[in-house]
Image (cartoon, helix red, strand yellow):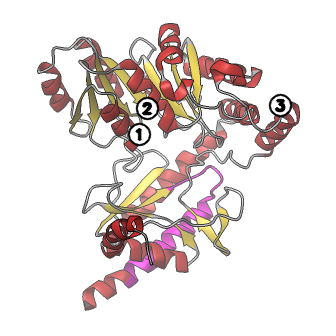
Amino acid sequence: MSSHLDQTLSPALAERRAAHLYRTRKLLQSPQTPNVVVDGKDYLAFCSNDYLGLANHPDVIVALQKAAEKFGVGSGASHLVAGHSSEHHALEEELAEFTGRERALLFSTGYMANLGAITALVGQGDAVFEDRLNHASLLDAGLLSGARFQRFLHNDLENLQNRLNKTDVQRKLIVVDGVFSMDGDCAPLPELAALAQKNNAWLMVDDAHGFGCLGKTGAGSAEHFGLTQDQLPILMGTLGKAAGSFGAFIAGSETLIETLIQFARPYIYTTAMPPAVAAATRASLHLIKTEHWRREHLNKLIAHFRAGAQALNLQLMDSFSPIQPIVIGDEAKALLISQQLAERGILIIAIRPPTVPVGSSRLRITFSAEHSIAQVDQLLTALADVMQVIGHEVAHD
């Protein structure tokens, strides 16, 4: 006999299944490379955020192994107790230099970095303004901060200005993604920076999907748009995507970082990441700086795919990033296409509500510098085949 807890929770699960919104985990049984083994089957994958192909790089692996031999596996404590190692400290200094900021502060995850920064900077009596398509962690942090939380229309400066005009609080925080995780487009950061300064507001950018990929040296959206620390005072980046490692950071002024050390609860009350992970990230950061060919090849793959997808009349979004979604619309159809591709050895995940708005379900295709042009052609051939099959099925319904 099921418990009262199970009886109460089960209907919501059944409802989600019926709406084609139920999520299941796939079991990865190989390294994070274009060719993966998932649930015992071989696939060509286009759904990883390992944009530069560094998650399985031998230099990164060796750096982790050597540091584990020296420091052990766990950090053992929070940064403020006894967990802040020399590897953590060196990585923070290198991230600050790379992003052109005075200092950087490590967090264990991007979610914690966003939650820590926003709740430390604004609270009751303040105001936070966020793009409607921001990452869930940013939205959650805005709600939890206690500040007056407002969402403005996607990349709509006029709508944001109208909301700012109605606010007279002292602390105003504008928060956006540098590259939006489900659409792949960029925020208009120079215009946002000017608007923030004009309204005496602070600008924070989550550059999870720009760091490593954008900019001449890969330093991300701030470098791509040429924004200084004064123009973009709060810069967040993650290390589990293009850097191929794990964790996140906030970069900014000395005063900002000291404020976060003192007031960011997710930083204060969390065990530090393992020193070996920080060492691995230092190795990947060196590769980001020196192996520019990775970004150049990645951009060639993106351009090749977009040309091929447009020739197939697929509905792409306005993106020059490694995130290249194909909008399908219907949840069930997006799932069916994903399943049909899987049968052809192509692994792409169907993204459905609540991750994206109702009616905008999509195939979220992502590219890595480890992909080849031939593999992109293999993807395009499979897409053409599947879309033709799906079209016939729809026509017969």
Mark 3 — residue? 71
The three-letter code of the residue at mark 2 reads Leu
Q: Quadrant of residue 107?
A: top right
Q: Earlier in the sequence, mark 3 or mark 1?
A: 3
Q: CA distance from mark 3 to mark 2?
A: 29 Å
Q: Residue 377's x, y, as percent?
A: 55, 67
Q: In this rendering, would 31 be left or right of 346?
A: right
Q: Main secondary structure of the magenta part?
A: helix
Residue drawn at x 63%, y 39% is 243
Q: Earlier in the sequence, mark 1 or mark 2?
A: 2
Mark 1 nearby-residue class (10 Å; few <14, some 14–19, many ≥20): some
Q: Secondary structure at mark 1?
A: helix
Report the disc number at residue 137.
1
Give the camera-side residue of 77 and 391.
77
Q: In this rendering, would 159 be left or right of 26?
A: left
Is 371 rendered above or below residue 207? Answer: below
Q: Secondary structure at mark 2?
A: helix
Residue 28 part of the magenta segment: no
Q: Which region of the structure is painted magenta?
A: 366-389
Q: Residue 357's x, y, as percent?
A: 27, 55
Q: Which residue sits furthest top?
A: 255
Quadrant into which the N terminus falls: bottom left
Residue 388 part of the magenta segment: yes
Mark 2 — residue? 115
Q: Earlier in the sequence, mark 3 or mark 2?
A: 3
Q: In this rendering, would 277 be left or right of 343?
A: right
- Contact check, label 1 and label 2, Cβ < 8 Å: yes
